[in-house]
Image (cartoon, rainbow, N blue to C red):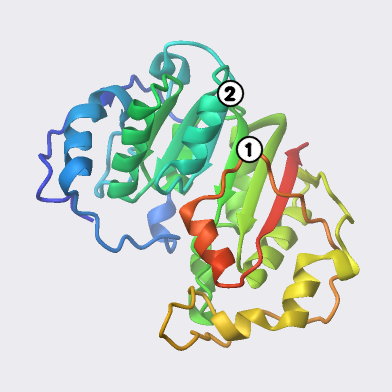
């Protein structure tokens, strides 16, 4: 996609030295997991992009699109952050609510937000500036390409994927981010013993996340067997039928409920469990709050890199 016309193409950005990558990033041959519906910057976000990018936005070399990563570019986090510290990466950081809150709470760690949505990155930079954070950087990039070469192997101490696009229509399931190929990339960038945290409010995607990572020899579920049976949020969703009522969108006042009719296989009782308690480091974001208001349930998973 082309960059927004209302933002100068030469917007200032943090220049980062790169070295030869381990391999190419062939992800443009696969369906991407995102669609950007409007990325025009207006008002304070436009100003933030122009004023703050020099301090917080990583200048990623491109191939064709403004979310691609040129083969051969490797991020030097020590240079970017001006120090050596454990690195936390959030894939799909949205408006930056989670990463800014955690960065403020844990100043001893570095935080990198990967996002394709330009207004979200601008809002994240605003948060960084307003909260006087020095340990957060952002990159406008397709996460799969970033994790294939831009991020060095075994360089990430914690990886977050919170509420990725569920692509709940059957014909779109191939676009979901968390599948076997992504698990391979996650294992590549995570250090041994590092944590991989995931959350979704869509039951069929939760099942897919659990299945993919349980099947990976690179990961172990820190809550294996926990919250199964009647205590499982999956069992509770199946029993309530809430997803048949609210579908994938909040029910707005004066409007009829939206139903997609696609809630995954209802097995009656979830005997596997494995669901993590809510991660206390994840604030209740505006997105998650809307899901809860709509009656949906949130599924958390936490895996450790073997």
Question: Quarter of the image holding residue 185?
Answer: top right
Q: Is residue 293 visible?
A: yes
Q: Assess disc 2: are there few (<14), some (14-19) or many (≥20) residues with their C-alpha within 10 Å of its C-alpha.
A: few
Instruction: Identify the residue position indicated by label 2 in the image.
Output: 106
Numbered label tally: 2
Please say if 91 is above or below 189. below
Q: Image check: 219 left or right of 115? A: right
Q: Nearer the viewer, residue 150 or 141?
A: 141
Checking the image for residue 18, the label placed there is: none
Q: Image check: 163 left or right of 305? A: left
- Residue 285 percent coordinates (x, y): 51, 50
- Residue 242 percent coordinates (x, y): 65, 80
User: Which one is earlier in the sequence, the residue at label 2 or at label 1?
Assistant: 2
Question: Quarter of the image holding residue 32?
Answer: bottom left
Q: Assess disc 1: are there few (<14), some (14-19) or many (≥20) residues with their C-alpha within 10 Å of its C-alpha.
A: few
- Residue 290 percent coordinates (x, y): 50, 64
Q: Nearer the viewer, residue 294 or 154?
A: 294
Question: Judging from the image, what secondary structure is the residue with disc 2 in?
Answer: loop
Q: Tell me the quadrant of the picture where the N terminus can be found.
A: bottom left
Please say if 193 is above or below 63. above
- Whether tag 2 and tag 1 are in contact, CB under 8 A, the answer is yes
For the point 50% across and 71% down, the residue is 167
The CA distance from mark 2 to mark 1 is 10 Å
- Residue 262 percent coordinates (x, y): 59, 83
Question: Judging from the image, what secondary structure is the residue with disc 1 in?
Answer: loop
Looking at the image, the residue that sits furthest to the front is: 254
Q: Is residue 263 visible?
A: no
Instruction: Identify the residue position indicated by label 1 in the image.
Output: 281
Q: Nearer the viewer, residue 48 or 211?
A: 48
For the point 59% across and 21% down, the residue is 86
Q: Tell me the quadrant of the picture where the C terminus can be found.
A: top right
For the point 33% across and 38% down, the residue is 70
């Amino acid at each position: 996609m082309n960059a927004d016309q209302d933002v100068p193409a030469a917007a200032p950005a943090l220049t980062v030295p790169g070295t030869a990558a381990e391999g190419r990033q062939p992800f443009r041959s696969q369906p991407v997991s995102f669609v950007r519906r409007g990325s025009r910057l207006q008002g304070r976000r436009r100003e933030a992009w122009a004023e703050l990018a020099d301090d917080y936005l990583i200048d990623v070399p491109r191939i064709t699109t403004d979310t691609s990563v040129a083969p051969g570019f490797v991020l030097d986090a020590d240079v970017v952050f001006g120090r050596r510290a454990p690195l936390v990466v959030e894939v799909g950081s949205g408006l930056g609510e989670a990463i800014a809150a955690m960065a403020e709470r844990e100043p001893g760690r570095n935080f990198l937000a990967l996002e394709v949505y330009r207004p979200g990155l601008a809002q994240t930079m605003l948060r960084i500036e307003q909260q006087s954070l020095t340990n957060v950087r952002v990159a406008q990039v397709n996460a799969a390409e970033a994790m294939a070469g831009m991020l060095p192997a075994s360089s990430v101490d914690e990886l977050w994927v919170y509420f990725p696009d569920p692509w709940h229509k059957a014909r779109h399931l191939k676009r979901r981010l968390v599948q076997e190929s992504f698990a391979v990339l996650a294992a590549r960038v995570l250090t041994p013993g590092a944590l991989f945290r995931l959350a979704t409010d869509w039951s069929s995607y939760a099942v897919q996340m659990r299945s993919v990572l349980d099947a990976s020899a690179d990961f172990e579920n820190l809550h294996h067997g926990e919250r199964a049976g009647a205590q499982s949020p999956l069992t509770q969703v199946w029993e309530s039928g809430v997803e048949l009522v609210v579908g994938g969108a909040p029910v707005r006042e004066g409007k009829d409920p939206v139903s997609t009719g696609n809630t995954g296989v209802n097995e009656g009782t979830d005997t596997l469990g494995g669901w993590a308690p809510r991660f206390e480091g994840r604030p209740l974001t505006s997105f998650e709050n809307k899901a809860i208001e709509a009656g949906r349930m949130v599924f958390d998973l936490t895996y450790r890199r073997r």
